[in-house]
Image (cartoon, rainbow, N blue to C red):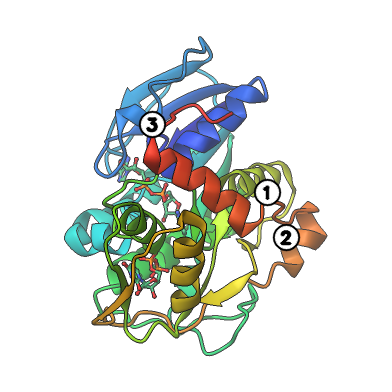
Amino acid sequence: MKAIITGGAGFLGSHLCDLLLLKGHEVICVDNLITGSAQNIEHIESDRFTYLEHDVTKPLYFGDRIDYVFHLASPASPIDYFALPIQTLKVGALGTYNMLGLAKEHAARFLLASTSEVYGDPLVNPQPETYWGNVNPIGPRGVYDEAKRYGEAITMAYHRYHGMDTRIARIFNTYGPRMRAGDGRVVPNFINQALRGEDLTVYGDGSQTRSFCYVSDLVDGLFRLMMSDFSDPVNIGNPGEMTVLEFAEVVVGIIGSDSRVVFEDLPVDDPKVRRPDISRAKDVLGWEPVVGLEEGLKETIRYFEKPIRGSY
Ligand code: NAD
Ligand code: UDP
């Protein structure tokens, strides 16, 4: 098969490029490098791989056959979408519209990388796909949450109105090699602080919870979802929930650093709990994560100590 991966030079996209190439497919990676990096794909030597620098908020035309469009392009870290609010809204809205149009033109199957942020600050824990969420549309996170909610709405409209074959993955916090050290997310922050022997910056009192999924599990889930015949949203994430404070202790324990914790202000609208209900992924995809937190963190710590690009 021949697949386009938008956001393919980003953290998740580059691992998805690796996975599809490993499975023998052709990959066209489309990215404008706004938050990604050419370094994430520079290890790829396959002649089945093409890189195209393009901003997907502008239309994209291909003469060749395309079978699958994985639409991952979007800033994903809170500090990125706080800094890039208009680009985030544009890529979620115009980018998704353009990539649906491209998929439709080629009768290709389309997958949207959506997010647990569609549940906002959830009043239900864990979150099943049937929960509609609790999002503040005008808060600083609204640019990301609402862009993704719009992305889901337009994807379902193309599915219902044009009969297109579409998939929606609601991705929960994922970590692993090729995250940017400075992307501000909790995993790279804590690991790099602990490696440098600095204090770990816990926002708020650290009682908010997250559930961390290792990247190889995540891209396996995305691939299975694309290959399934299921067009309603599917949560992809690891249900192992812990508080941010507990997570800080785990990171310090594995690294063996004598870093301490310092408390800083909690960002506005920071969700208080987050944990995926993955019953649907288990039933429909036969998928569940297999990499434990300690194993995944050790791999990620090795990457931040000494970046290794090709991990497959
Ligand atoms: P990332 O920032 O590493 O990757 C995003 C990629 O999209 C980057 O390479 C960036 O340059 C590219 N991009 C952004 N706007 C673009 C545009 N207009 N045109 C072309 N390329 C553009 O982030 P990530 O963590 O790899 O996230 C990938 C996708 O998964 C995003 O859609 C994100 O919303 C979703 N997601 C990720 C997580 C996670 O924990 N990593 C959780 C939920 C959802
Ligand atoms: N967080 C933290 N310290 C940091 C970075 C993040 O305490 O240095 C917290 C953040 O407030 C949130 C959680 O860790 O409660 C996860 O944050 P992240 O930015 O990784 O992603 P989010 O789940 O908020 O999208």
Q: Is residue 274 above or below residue 134?
A: above
Disc number lying in front (3 or 1): 3
Residue 135 is marked as none
Residue 226, quarter of picture: top right
- First of labels 1, 2 by sequence position: 1
* Secondary structure at numbered mark 2: helix
User: Mark 3 and 1 residues: CB-CB less than 8 Å, in contact?
Assistant: no
Q: Residue at x 24, y 42 (%)?
A: 34
Mark 3 vs mark 1: which is more N-terminal? 3
Quarter assignment of residue 303: top left
Q: Name the residue beneath numbered marker 1.
A: 225
Q: Nearer the viewer, residue 234 or 260?
A: 260
Label count reads: 3
On-image quarter of the N terminus:
top right
Q: Is disc 3's CB within 8 Å of ligand 1?
A: yes
- Evaluate whether residue 102 shows in this view: no
Residue under label 2, please give it. 281
Do tag 3 and tag 2 residues touch (Cβ < 8 Å)?
no
The answer to the question of whether label 1 and label 2 lie on touching residues, with beta carbons closer than 8 A, is: yes
Closer-to-camera residue (218/118): 218
